[in-house]
Image (cartoon, rainbow, N blue to C red):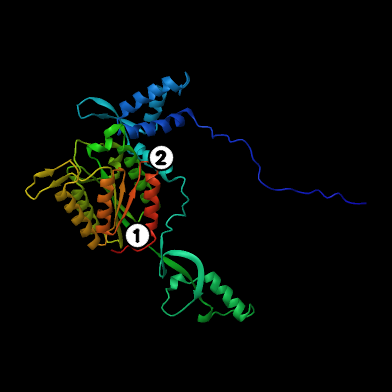
Amino acid sequence: MKKKVESIRSGFIFKKFEEEEKSPFDKLFEIFKELITHTSGDFEEAIEWLRQLDVEYKLTTSEYTIDDFIEDLKKKGYIREEIKPDGKGGMGITAKTERAIRQQALNQIFGKIKRSGSGNHSTKYQGLGDEHTGEFKEFHYGDSLDKISMTESLKNAQINHGAGEFKMTEDDLVVEETHHKSQMSTVLMIDISHSMILYGEDRITPAKKVAMALAELITTRYPKDTLDILVFGNDAWAISIKDLPYLNVGPYHTNTVAGLQLAMDLLRRKRNTNKQIFMITDGKPSCIRERDGTYYKNSVGLDPYIVEKCYNAASQARKLHIPITTFMIAKDPYLERFVREFTQANHGKAFFTGLKGLGEMIFEDYENNRKKKIRG
């Protein structure tokens, strides 16, 4: 009698995608984080936009209203009462919200890019590093004792001398090879001149999101790295990570040289081997501050005097072994020529791009630069 053999099939099972169920608060909170970024931290304006969206798209129900959402924001510590500059009371976002906005920016911009585990930023050089490779070599005099793999060494001792009478010699010892981790000090320069909101295009919000995502990436994944953020208009000044959601453009010209000089000053204080400058801009340099404190401004074309100052700053950064990567949002041919010559003076890199994909490019460039030792 033949026994019936049942074949077992294995493989993929496909089913219709079912979105993860979110609570009414979580659904509104996702939209709120986007709106609070666009309004530069203005809670009242963000809520007004949310109410308008609710009217149009029926985001809430009678069981859970916008007012219920605001109460939950208070209870969960996302907003608090504060005194406005005009002396009136109102609501403002908290550090908890600032962190949530940065995390959302990180997920939106970098979430689709495949990344390795935390801290995997190694140079190609083998030696006394702190990143394990999973490969082993014989122990030699001078190797660090804390790199000896006891498990592999014990295994060798048993193989070489038998299990009957255990003994271990120097020839049995193996060490695990490691790579040096590179550290990076980065300055991110953001153009806040008036042109960042001209022609009906909001360019400052995407730049702000990129900065928040990069800040969150570095502080959570590469805590040994440093990130300084500065903005430049007529002048340049450093801002803290917590200031990013509130960043706005002003009635400024573009003093690129002031931004570069401040960036180099910040990087001179760092002891990290690798240093770099990322610059996000959409316009031509149009302003210089003179030694006597006055400003020389010219928005018509490319002023040779201002341009030459920019080239000099780029060359100075090269001598300090600080490469500059320029992310140029504008597409004007004469501006592209300027950026190419500026990049050549620095031996850096330039990306001519729109707003779409800006974050991914900055992330990939940051990752690539961390894997190598940057030299001038």
Q: In whole angstroms, how far apart are the C-alphas of marks 2 and 1? A: 25 Å
Residue linked to disc 1: 183
Task: Please report the residue visible at 75 percent of the width from the left and 48 percent of the height from the top.
Answer: 8
User: Looking at the image, do the residues carrying marks 2 and 1 touch, with CB atoms under 8 Å apart?
Assistant: no
Q: Position of residue 211 (x, y in %)?
A: 33, 44
Task: Please report the residue visible at 51 percent of the width from the left and 69 percent of the height from the top.
Answer: 135
Picture quarter with the C terminus? bottom left
Q: Is residue 153 above or below residue 102?
A: below
Q: In the image, what residue type sits under mark 1?
A: Gln
Q: Residue furthest front?
A: 333
Q: In this image, 63 relative to 223: left or right?
A: right
Q: In this image, 168 relative to 242: left or right?
A: right
Residue linked to disc 2: 104
Q: Position of residue 152 (x, y in %)?
A: 55, 71
Q: In the image, what residue type sits under mark 2?
A: Gln
Q: Position of residue 265 (x, y in %)?
A: 20, 55
**Foreground of the two, 136 or 296:** 296
